Amino acid sequence: MELNIKERTKNSVLMSFKDLDIGFLNLLAAELLKDKRVLNAYPRKPHPLLDEVEFFLLVTDGTDMIALLEEKVNAIKSSYEEFRKKFMNSLGKASKS
């Protein structure tokens, strides 16, 4: 995965990714939009033939974007781990039936 910062202001950032699926960025945007410090967050694919996706994040004044992104990525990881445990338990119960 390659990451480039295309634009940055004190409360917004536009990032460009190569070799990253837009699905993860959709999940990240959904998690970010639950937070009151986030004014807008969305991924987009500038052109269907390019292997590039972009992600825009706009936050309230004074919000640390790096800490916010780390917090939300960790929340996604925790949700995944919870899902994985429940799924594995369900598989174990299903195979015993």
Image (cartoon, rainbow, N blue to C red):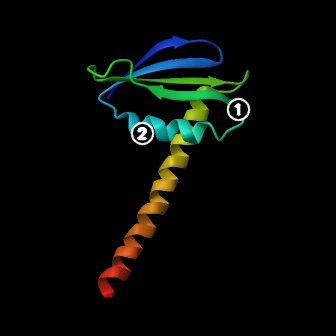
Q: Provide the secondary structure element on which disc 2 rests.
A: helix
Q: Position of residue 55 (x, y in %)?
A: 48, 25
Q: Where is the N terminus found, in terms of image quarters?
A: top left
Residue at 45% x, 35% y is 25
Q: Where is the C terminus found, in terms of image quarters?
A: bottom left
Residue 1: mark in rendering: none
Q: Where is residue 29 in the image (x, y as percent from the top left)?
A: 53, 35
Is 40 in front, or is 82?
A: 40
Give the residue at mark 1: 37
Three-letter residue code for mark 1: Arg
User: How many numbered circles does the render carry?
Assistant: 2
Q: Position of residue 19 (x, y in %)?
A: 29, 29
Is 51 in front, or is 68?
A: 51
Using a 10 Å C-alpha cutoff, classify the residue at mark 1 as few (fewer than 14 neighbours), some (14 to 19) or many (20 or more).
Answer: some
Q: Quadrant of residue 35?
A: top right
Residue at 35% x, 79% y is 92
| Residue 7 versus residue 72 in the image, above or below | above
Q: Position of residue 30 (x, y in %)?
A: 55, 40
Three-letter residue code for mark 2: Phe
Q: CB of mark 1 within 8 Å of CB of mark 2?
A: no
Is 8 in front, or is 95?
A: 95
Residue at 47% x, 37% y is 26
| Residue 58 versus residue 87 in the image, above or below | above
Give the residue at mark 2: 24
